[in-house]
Image (tube, rainbow, N blue to C red):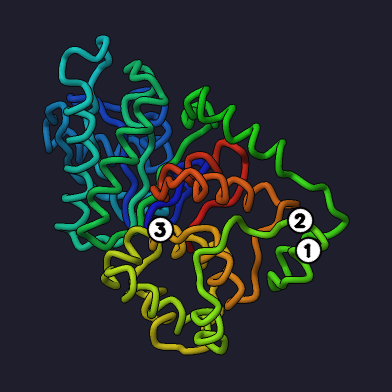
Amino acid sequence: MPLQIVRNDITKIKVDVIVNAANSQLKMGGGVCGAIFNAAGAIELQAECNLIGGCNTGKAVITKGYNLPAKYIIHAVGPIWNGGENNEEEHLKSCYLNSLILAKENQLESIAFPLISSGIYGYPKEKAFKVAVATIQDFLLENEMMVYLVVFDKKAVELSEKLFKSIEKYIDDNYVDELFDISRYIYTEEIQLNYGFAPKASKRSLEDVVAHLDETFTEMLLRLIDEKGKTDIETYKKANIDRKLFSKIRSDKFYKPSKSTALALAISLELNIDETTDLLAKAGYALSHSNKFDIIVEYFIEEGIYDIFEINEALFAFDQNLLGF
């Protein structure tokens, strides 16, 4: 999954480079900055930073990682929040974009970001999160890189109250507490009838169902890509899966993806519930109303919302696994 939202200690993540939320003097500070300096080795890291001299707001520079698991540290200087009327958002976008460009120029394949400026610089966490995700998402549409966005608590990922309540109501209205999770089983007509999970009005013809009865997951996926007028690159980028995984799927007629991957591809192709059900069934999965993860994804499909990062934001807020892999 090219973009992952994780709760972790950024100094312990094994990536090519981590990003430090730096000050313009590149001096050891508090918070994330202080933790990174301490973990890397403050004396050596400060000596290298002193040689660089400084960094302007919105810009980024790179140093060695020293004692960190990461090989390098990118120091990005975020804006101080002054109410949002002083180009704070543009400066914050620049922090992320310049860091990503610097990582690419140094041929680095994985990077971990903190929520820049959301600590002592006062940038509202939920706003900082949305800027980070949007900027990283745009970069990943044109580039290959594994990106981690490290947050320390869920407060940084705050859905709008209206959306949160809407999803919560959808879960309450649809959740069924079964003794077993039928999502492990193929979505058969018998299960639909017995458990009341039949999809809404079908948009397929009987001829279409019969014609593609023996398709594998890969065959159906490739057919849908053509039918939807999508390209391979557009499909795996919007599914938040990497090129290598997609290549495995494409080259293996009998490839069985994880459920998370199958659903991510359904979202990427903007499939309706009926089509999503069919695609999942080819891999041996189903949408279950005894599974909150499934219900949340179903909610977004029903609402016609196919932004995988918005869906993952909601899944994260409800303590569910994310789409992709």
Three-letter code, disc 2: Gly
Residue closest to the far right? 179
Classify residue 201 by image quadrant.
Answer: bottom right
The residue that appears at 17% across and 50% down in the rendered structure is 102
Instruction: Measure the alpha-carbon separation of dots 1 and 2.
Output: 5 Å
**x, y percent for residue 12:** 48, 48
Instruction: Measure the alpha-carbon separation of dots 3 and 1.
Output: 26 Å
**x, y percent for residue 166:** 57, 31
Name the element at disc 1: helix
Instruction: Measure the alpha-carbon separation of dots 3 and 2.
Output: 24 Å
The residue that disc 2 covers is 196
Q: Nearer the viewer, residue 154 or 208?
A: 208
Residue 100 marker:
none
The residue that appears at 82% across and 47% down in the rendered structure is 177
The residue that disc 3 covers is 270
The residue that appears at 34% across and 46% down in the rendered structure is 18
Q: Is residue 32 left or right of residue 180?
A: left
The residue that disc 1 covers is 193
Three-letter code, disc 1: Leu
Name the element at disc 3: loop
**x, y percent for residue 229:** 27, 69
Labels 3 and 2: the sequence-earlier one: 2
